[in-house]
Structure formats: C-alpha cells, structure tokens
Image: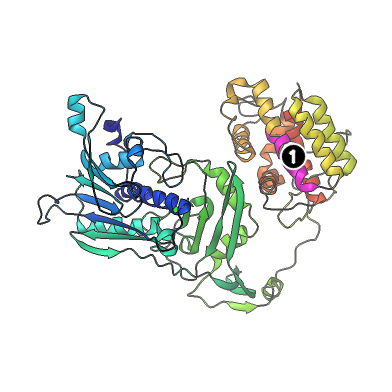
Amino acid sequence: MYLLLKNQGYEPAYALAEFIDNAIHAYQIESAQNPNPENELKIHVKIYSEQYINDKLKNSIIISDNGPGIQKAKLEAALKPAKQPQNKGLSEFGIGMKAAAVWFADNWTLETKPLSESNKLTTDFNLENLLNSGSSKIQVQEQASIEKNYTKISLKNIRKPIDPKKYQEIKKDITEIYQRFISRERISIYFSYDEKEEKLIFENNNEVLVTPVYETIKGQLYAIGAPKTWSVPIEFVMNGHLVTGDIMLLKEGSYVTNPGLVLFRNGRVIHGTTRTPYIPNKLFKTGNKYGRQRIYGELFLDGQPISYTKDKFEFNEEHFFAQIEATPGMHDLQKQAQAYRTKETPKVVATREEAEKEQNIKPPHTKPKPTAPHNPTTPQGGTAQPTSPATNQGQNNSDQPPPSAPTIQSFLKSLGEQTNYIGLKDIIDESVRLYTSARYIGTALCLRIILEQGILNRIKDKHPNEYQNYSADGIHTIFTKLKNEVGQLGPKTPTINKIFHYSKDQKVVQAIKANGVAKIFDSIILLNSISHGNYKPNKQEIDTLVANTQPLLEWAYCKN
C-alpha cells in the first residue's frame, strides 16, 4: 500500500497541506471540547536545502505544531493507511498524512506529546526496511516528558529537493489554500527556508466593480442607468449539500492575479489559486477575453466529493455550472464582464431606449412570431401553439396562452394512468393537488421528478443496454445526452440509433432538436433552478414548463 502511495500525483503544496490539515483538524476538535480563547495554534513548516550547513538537516522538511498531539491509544490508527478518523472534517480519508509522507521521502519520523498524557511517543518509519523485512509493524518509543503538547514530523532525504524558487511557489500556494484560517481564526502558519522564518499573511484586496450597465450599440459604448454593484449571491443544493458563495466582477481586473473561481471545502481552498487559476469556459466563456480578467468567485462546497489528494472536486461539472448560470443575475454579470472597458470613455444615458433612439434603432414588434418547428398534440387532441420558455423574469411571449388549468391537470393525470411505477403515480397525483392549490414551487419539485424519472424509466424499459449510461444523471445531463442522440438523426441520415427512431419518435425528436428555437432546454434549466430553491415560479411559468416539455413527457410515458 505504501509502495503505491509514494507514486501518487501530488503537488508539493498539496502534499504539505495534508500535515497542516491534520494539525488544524485536531485543534478544532480540541477547541470544541475544551474552549479556550487564549489557545492559539501555531504551525511551523521548515524546509532545508541541499546546501544547508547542517548535514543532518540537509534536504529535509520538518512540520511541527503546538496542537493537542496524538494520544497513545490513537497512534496506531493514525499510522494505518485508509483508517478514517472518527470526526471528519479537514482530515477525512485517513490516508493523507501517510500518503504525503511517503510521497516526499521513504524515511520519516513522528514525535508527539499528547496534551492529556505525560509521555512522549516517537516512531521511525523506513519504507525500505519494512519491505525488506516483510514487516507490517513499527516500534514506538515511549518516555516521560515535561514538554508541552506538540506533534512533529521530520521528512528526511526528500526525493525532490526544493530550491528557493520552488519554496516561494509552495509558500504562496499554502497562503492561498489556508487564507480563511490565517485571516480569521486563532491559527498561524510559519514557513522557513534554511531557518529564515516568516509568518504567512493573506491579503485580499479584491473590490467589487460598481458601475452602470455597459453596452456597445452600433460601435458606440454606452453607460446605461444608475451604477450597480456587480455581485451575484449563489445558493443551490447539489448532491444533497448546500452550495453558497458569491460571484462578482472585480474593480481591478487582471489576467495574472485573478484566480478565477475559488472553491472551498471545510474552509480550505480545493481549487483555484493565483498560480493555478480555475477558469471554466462555462462561466468565463473564453480564457482570453475581458471576462477572464474580472469574473471572480468564492464558492463553499462542504460535503461535495473530492479526490483523496484534495486538489479537485469530483462531481458533474456540467450540472454544477448549469445551476450557477440559472441563478438570477448571472447572465447580466457575464455580459457586463465582456462589455466593460476602462480605456474607453462611454456615453452616459439614462436608459437603453435613449441609446437606441440616438442610433435610430426601431423598437421590436411587441408580438413575436412563433419559433417552434413542431406542433405537439394536446391531451384533448388539439394542437398546442409554440410557447417561449419560462424565464427568470417570468415572461411569456407566446402567441397563444399555455394550456389552461384543466388541461394541465388532465394531462398530468393521463401520465399517471400510463405508468406502472407506483411511486411515480403518487408523485403525479401530488403534482395535480399542488397545482390546483396554487403551490407552484411544490408543483415544480414534482415536475422535475416526473420528467427525470419518466425518461429514465422509458430508457430502462425500452433500451436496457443504454440505461447504465443515463442512470446516475440528473435532468440537465439527461437532456444533453438525448440531444446528442438526435443531433445527426434525420431522413437523409441513419433513421434509427440507440434510443430513437426518426419516424416512430418524430414528435419528440423534433422537440429535442428545437433546443435552440423552442427553448425547451431553457425550461429544463429553470426547472433545476426552481427545484434547488433559487426561484419562485408563478402559474404562467408552470403552464409554460409543462407545454414546452410535453413532447418529452408523452414519449417518456408512452407504453408503445
């Protein structure tokens, strides 16, 4: 096991972070059990070069802290790989310290003086000796000590020597990884290189941009309306855990110093630092445009799955960014990021209409033309008129109103009559009751399950070989995969694929292909946003959601 761990893909800063995690985690547990406002945790990381004058310390690292130490009864568990701690937090997998230690060096020493005990414990770990002897045990020396509580780990003859340049990079990374601890808590981290010590200090000078809306109209840059603060609060549920934070535009943009999106878990940074910025195209659009300079975010993702090296999250990024983009205000923030200029003086106007009038732009028609290429049949046998999606502003620009209340109710009831899944029948009945009672958030929650589970059940029943490819996905990802399935399907191309037959499933194929026209996909994103508590819909929006997803629902619940 240890032989495998020595070859893992750590970065030096994240390997050192494992020791710092353990120290902070133990300190947090002790502080919770025995609060003491004067108790401050001090962590020292001492790095020695190959040229250091003391031969015993050359090319080594020593990490020490004045935390509660490791009790004798818990030392064996602390040294076993993959022995998970009883109280999870910064220490979670029970493998970090061991993996990081052998990644740095084959030979290391652990010393600890527990707070509640009178003896000091010392053990030497030598991987080569253990492998040669075939032993799975190491000796622990125990001796009386009057020293205060501490833990010290000495890594000897590290595999990759650290030069001054690499030291500065590691120090900068650690400062950003633990920015919230060293800025706001009774925790201090000290770094030294060949005994030249300094305390890590994190300075966040980011200011939020406060300006009017910027927009270029016919080559003229305008500043429209009153100044606003360009920051969007983020809050949604993913994988059963709350995601919170803020995404903003920075007053001072920079390609060099902006880490992009900074993702925290249990208070420490997992992803997004100045040296390794997180610039997802889904949010920043492209890395070489103005948005890259100014879009900055801090999001807190406690409980989300991560790699055991704690340097990346392991979840569906497409779903994650769909939730962010569905947040009210995000689209406007992204537009402002691309439009805002500092080297160009805008013309100030009170409204966009004023700018359009100046540019002789005629106002749009108040009644837009239908855009949907398909005419799905309603449960009554009539023809549903195309509808625009429910948006975060609650607008509906369709030529015809969406189905009336009886239409919605009878349509949903018809789905319940067609499914053999008892749980779904109950949820469909509940959706009708909630809709009738004008409880539209509850209706949306039911609609999401009805749509998502209905599609999954259809694939499971009709296409069992493909079910595994969809079974773990949410509605956003499911629809994206369905769209890819029908992307090349047509009368002049293969008429049948893994899921669809062009003629037999023509109505749903046309509906899915209408993604960019009928905006069914927008309705699904909005359904996600409602389901995660980011938006409160009205009746008209629920009606539109049902109308725009009607072909999918009919296909999903059809027994043929």
Residue placed most toward the observer, 397 or 121: 121
Residue 349 % position (x, y):
65, 77
The residue positioned 76% from the left and 55% from the top of the image is 394
Residue placed most toward the observer, 487 or 122: 122
Q: Is residue 357 magenta?
A: no
Q: Is residue 211 left or right of residue 16?
A: right
Is the residue marked by circle 1 packed among few (<14), some (14-19), or many (20+) residues within 10 Å? many
Residue 404 % position (x, y):
88, 44
Q: Is residue 442 magenta?
A: yes
Residue 417 % position (x, y):
82, 26
Dividing the picture into quadrants, the one containing residue 174 is bottom left
Q: In what element is the residue under mark 1? A: helix
Query: What kind of colouring is applied to the model shown?
Result: rainbow
- Would residue 387 be visible to someone looking at this image? no
The residue positioned 69% from the left and 41% from the top of the image is 514
Residue 544 % position (x, y):
78, 46
> Which quarter of the rendering shows the N terminus?
top left
Dividing the picture into quadrants, the one containing residue 234 is bottom right
Q: Which residue is mark 1?
A: 447
Q: Is residue 37 left or right of residue 364?
A: left
- Would residue 459 be visible to someone looking at this image? yes
The residue positioned 27% from the left and 59% from the top of the image is 191
Image height check: is 128 above or below 442?
above
Which portion, as a residue range, is magenta?
439-452
Q: Is residue 538 left or right of residue 381?
A: left
SS assignment for the magenta stretch, majority? helix
